Amino acid sequence: MNQKTLKLQDIKAQAKLGGGQKRIDTQHSKGKLTARERIEYLLDEGSFEEIGMLVTHRTTDFGMDKEVYYGDGVVTGYGTINGRLVYIFAQDFTVFGGALSETHAEKICKVMDLAVKMGAPMIGLNDSGGARIQEGVRSLGGYADIFHRNVKASGVIPQISAIMGPCAGGAVYSPAITDFTMMVEGSSYMFVTGPNVVKTVTNEEVTSEELGGASTHSTKSGVAHTTSANDIACLEDIKRILSYMPQNNQEKPYDVPYKITEEYRFDLDNIVPESANKPYDMKDVIHQIIDEDTFFEIHKDYSENIVVGFARLGGKSIGIVANNPMFLAGCLDVNSSIKAARFTRFCDSFNIPLLVLVDVPGFLPGTDQEWNGIIVHGAKLLYALSEATVPKVTLITRKAYGGAYDVMNSKHIGADMNFAWPNAEIAVMGAKGASEIIFKKEISEAADPAAKLAEKEAEYADKFATPYRAAQRGFIDEVILPNESRRKLLKAFAMLENKQVELPNRKHGNIPL
C-alpha cells in the first residue's frame, strides 16, 4: 500500500471522527446518537455513500483558521431504505455545535439538488445551534439557499425533517417547509427566538423545553407531526412513514401483497351509539376498515377532533381524514381545518388516495373561533379537498350538518364515491334546532310546547335527517350497512385506481392562507 493511499485512509478516519472522540462520548452521555450512527441505523446496511467528506470551512476570522474539521459539521450523501434510494444530511453537533456555515450549506444544497434530479426522497437530520456567527451573512445566505430548494422540491419529492437536537432561529424554516417534521422528546427543541431573548423582550421566564420542545410542538403549535421517545424510535418512524409514499410525484405509492378474503367487519355494527349525542372514537372505525396494524397517525396529539394519517387498504396506501366525536363532538375548528388541509394537500401531491370519514355537527361556534379566523381557515380544508385530484371516497357514519357537510369531501366538491350508513343524518342542522326555527309559532301556541317540539323534531328528523333524501338526489352513491364498509371501500378504490383529471391551465391557485 503506497503512501498516498495511507494518507487518504488517515484523512477519512479523521473525517469520520467528527469533532473528536471526547465530544462524541459527551453526545452519548446525553442519550443521543452521533450523526454517522443515525445515518448508519436509518439506511440499509452498507448502502450509504458519502458526498463531501473532505469539505472544510473557508473562514479565517476570529481564529477560525486554527480549528478546522473535515466535513464541516454535516454528513451528506445517499443510500437506500428498504431498497429505495434516498438522499440524506445529518448535522454533526460535535463540530462547532452543528452550526451552519457557507460550506455546510453548500453540502446540503448539493444533495438536495441531486434528490430532485433523481426523483428520490430527501431526509434531513437536524441537530444544530443555528447560523455560524463567525461567518455573518454568508451563513444566512446558506440558509436561504436551502429554503429556496425546499420550496422548489415541495410537491416534487417527499421531504422529511427529524429534529434530533437544537434547531433555532432561521434554521427552523427549512423543516417548516418540508412535508413532515419529527421531534425527539427531551432532547430536541425548535424556536425562532430562544428563552433569553423572550425574557428580555417580554419578561417571560420559560425553558427551552417549554418554549419549543417536542411536547409543546406536538400539542400546542402543531409544528411537530410526530414525536418519539429517543433517536432510534424517531429513525424507525422515518422508515415507516416513507413506506406509504412514492419516490416522487410522478409515481404511485408502493403496494404490499394482499389477498382479498372475507371482508365484512361486523364489529362496525356496534361502534356508533344509538343516541346521536353520545361520543365514540372514530379510530375504532378506522381500525376496523383498514388492513390490520397499518395506521400511522399524523399530528396524534394536536387538534384531536380530527384524525389524519396513513394506512393500507387491500395492501394499497391511502390517506385518512376523519372527524372524531370523542373531542369537541367532532366539530371543525381553526386548528383541525389547517391540520386536515395540509395533510390532504400532501396526499394529493404524491398520488395517495383519500378516505374521508364524516361525523361532523358543524363548525365550532364562539367568538374565539370567529376572531381567530374560522372563516378563512375552514376555507383551507374546503379548498384542499376541492383541489385534490387523487381518488376521493367519503363515508358518512353519523352526522353531516351544515357547511361542514359540504367541506368534508361532499359530492359537490368533487368526491368520487360517497357512502353513508343507514343512521346517517344529512341536514342543514340538527332536528331540534331546525324544528325550533321552522315551527316556532306552532310550538309557542301549543298547549304543551315541549310535546309539540318533540313531535316536530321527530317529523323533521324523519323527513330530512336521513341519508335517503341525499341518495335520491345522487349526492350519496349508496347507503350501506356498517359491516360491509371495508368491502365497499376496497371495491371503490380499486375502481378509481386509474383516475385521470384534466386541470385548468393556470400557474397555481390562491389558497386562502
Image: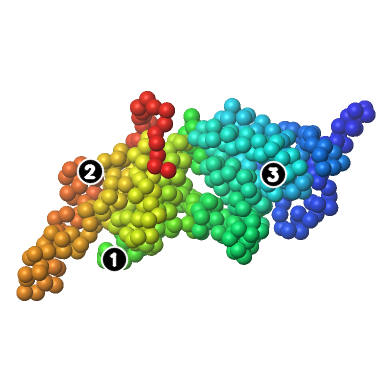
Seen in the picture, residue 119 relative to 343 is either above or below; the reply is above
Residue furthest right in the image: 3
Q: For mark 3, does the 10 Å Cα neighbourhood hold few (<14), some (14 to 19), or many (20 or more) residues?
A: many
Residue for point 54% across, 41% down: 177
**At which x and y percent is residue 466?**
20, 54
Question: Of circles 2 and 3, which is in front?
Answer: 3
Label located before the other in sequence (2 or 1):
1
Q: Which of 307 and 210 is in front in this view?
A: 210
Can residue 5 be seen in the rendering of this structure? yes
Q: Identify the residue under disc 1.
A: 277
Q: For mark 2, does the 10 Å Cα neighbourhood hold few (<14), some (14 to 19), or many (20 or more) residues?
A: some
Query: In the shown orientation, is residue 383 left or right of residue 185?
Result: left
Q: For mark 1, does the 10 Å Cα neighbourhood hold few (<14), some (14 to 19), or many (20 or more) residues?
A: few
- Disc 3 marks which amino acid? Ala
Which SS class for mark 2? Answer: loop
C-alpha distance separating marks 2 and 1 = 25 Å
Q: Identify the residue under disc 2.
A: 475
Label located before the other in sequence (3 or 1):
3
In the picture, residue 132 is in which quadrant?
top right
- Disc 2 marks which amino acid? Phe
Q: Which of 85 and 413 is in front in this view?
A: 413
Question: Of circles 3 and 1, which is in front?
Answer: 3
Residue furthest bottom in the image: 448
Residue furthest top in the image: 505
Query: In the shown orientation, is residue 420 left or right of residue 91?
Result: left
- Disc 1 marks which amino acid? Asn
Q: Identify the residue under disc 3.
A: 131
C-alpha distance separating marks 3 and 1 = 53 Å
Q: How is the image coloured?
A: rainbow
Q: Are marks 2 and 3 in contact (CB under 8 Å)?
A: no
